Amino acid sequence: MTFLESIFARLGRVADEPVLGEVRDGQIVSVTGADLLAMIAEARGFAVARGLKPGDRCALLAPNSIRWVALDLALMAEGVIVVPLDPRQVAKDWMAVISDSTPSLVCSADPALGAEIQGGAPAIVPFDEIFGGAQRPLITSPPRHHGDHDAATIVYTSGTSGEPKGVVLNAGNITFMLGCTNARLNQLMGAQVEQESVFQYAPFCFAAARILLLTSLSRHTMLTLSTDLAKLADELKLASPHYFVNVPMFLERVRRRVEESIQKRGGFAAKLFEMARAGYDRQRDGQARLGGLLCLALARKIMFPAIRANIGPNLKALICGSAPLAADTQLFFMMIGIPVLQVYGLTETTAICTMDEPGKVEPGYVGRAVPGIEMMVADGTAEILVRGPNVFPGYWQRPAETAKALEGGWFHTGDQGEADASGNWRITGRLKNLIILNSGHNVAPEPLEQALAASLPEAQQVVLLGNQRSFLAALVTPSGANGSSNGTSAAKIQSTLDALNAGLPHYKQIRAFHVLPEPFSVENGLLTTMGKLKRDAISARYAAEIEKLYQKKPA
């Protein structure tokens, strides 16, 4: 049974049970299995009436919603290849994807979004026309059977260091991956009989978000969709999920918010928190002292439960992917009693290669390869290579790049990493990000960026520089909590750098820095929607500031 047939069968079995919802005006508006199937039947009727055929492409330009999900399933049920667009991007980015994927239609939830891409684009159809109650035949037959090699979707990469590429994912990729995710979630949830509650805020244009959606629809789950990123904390309390997928940036913000709140309270609360954290760290290092253990026990009884309730009272775990999570942040959540399970993968690997196993989490690592997936490290470069049913068949209309990515029968991830004796993987950097100093030394920027950011809570982001230069330098952005560079003093940064540099070889020492006036964001074009740095764009935007850094005599 394919992933789509499994989802349709499950929706039929839970006809009267809520399966999908979205937050509206402080309430969850939900649909049952029967409701969702009815919406899918209506959208399938639209697709057939518009003459869409198996193999045609159809782009979806809309934020996450129940109607987005119904249309996605309806199009795939008719054999149409879905191309999700990122609603937070700008028109030129949408047009690049549209031009490359050549969809027959673009379906948009907001007429204003559709208006931005008029001119040379295919027909743009508003969601209201698809679900507006037009007199079309409803198609309630089982979905078209996909062979393993039949394309189901084209998901475009985020383009952090170049032009986005269309990753073709076929039915075999998705069916295999849903088997993996369901198995791991069964481990997390155990013998739970009640319906699971899951929350989703990441856009469906990303492979990991889509896999969570399809996984949720295939199991005993109620999935609640965020509709306002500015109200995530309130939405989380409303949904009360057992788990949800995160990016490191979100977890860093939650940690920072909790720590700042405790510091503002001061007094006994701040003292207890710091002593409990010290006790927890010593316990992990095998050097526990009675006083620290007592403080940790007290915090677990009177402080940590309130923190957990404020984040999510029913959380069994947080799932984190997209980029490596700082070990300190992972330890923070583990200390307060919320496990963080890391996932590693790329769009080309159907979002996942490794997943942490509940109860076997090692901070700083991303888990073992999922059963059925092989991983190895290439000689000389430490590049991670992957082989298995999760690996995509190729890039859309890019045969040369496909051949290069799949050379030797392995997918070349572009990521560097290593596995310990038990097969637990650690991601150490990305080949394209590697800084090569003019001395010939190679430096992976990510570990140093994480170390500096962890030691400098006033900073929101750190970007390391130095390619073909004589020394390393850094761009530092202010914390959103401060709102300006005033909160990130030059003296504090320099003292932090001095402490960090003391333990590093000369070529890894950061000799200069510049504080930028604002954080990198999606809105200013320097972050992807999933919080990844657009390094090339950052270097171009601040080229003058970077040049000035290297005109100075290094510290």
Image (cartoon, helix red, strand yellow):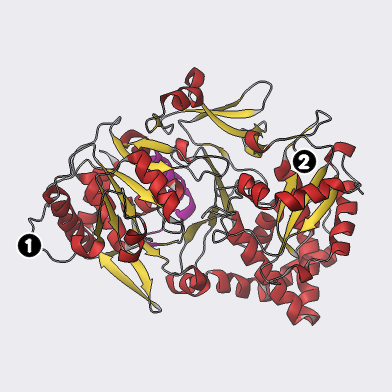
Left or right, residue 433 beside residue 469 = left
| Eye-nearest disc, 2 or 1 | 2
Circle 2: residue type: Gly
Q: Which residue is mark 2?
A: 466
Left or right, residue 333 beside residue 18 = right
Q: Residue at x 68, y 74 (%)?
A: 303
Task: Say which of 359 and 355 sits in front.
Answer: 355
- Say which element carries label 2: loop
Q: Which residue is mark 1?
A: 135
Dot 2 or dot 1, earlier in sequence: 1
Magenta residue span: 177-197
Left or right, residue 456 beside residue 101 = right
Examine the rendered structure and indicate whether residue 277 appears above or below residue 388. below
Q: Residue furthest front?
A: 119
Task: Say which of 200 and 186 sits in front.
Answer: 200
Q: Residue at x 84, y 59 (%)?
A: 493
Mark 2 vs mark 1, CA separation in Å = 63 Å
Left or right, residue 555 beside residue 184 = right
Circle 1: residue type: Gln
Point out residue 99 in the picture as x, y percentages from the top left corner. 36, 42
Examine the rendered structure and indicate whether residue 227 appears above or below residue 452. below
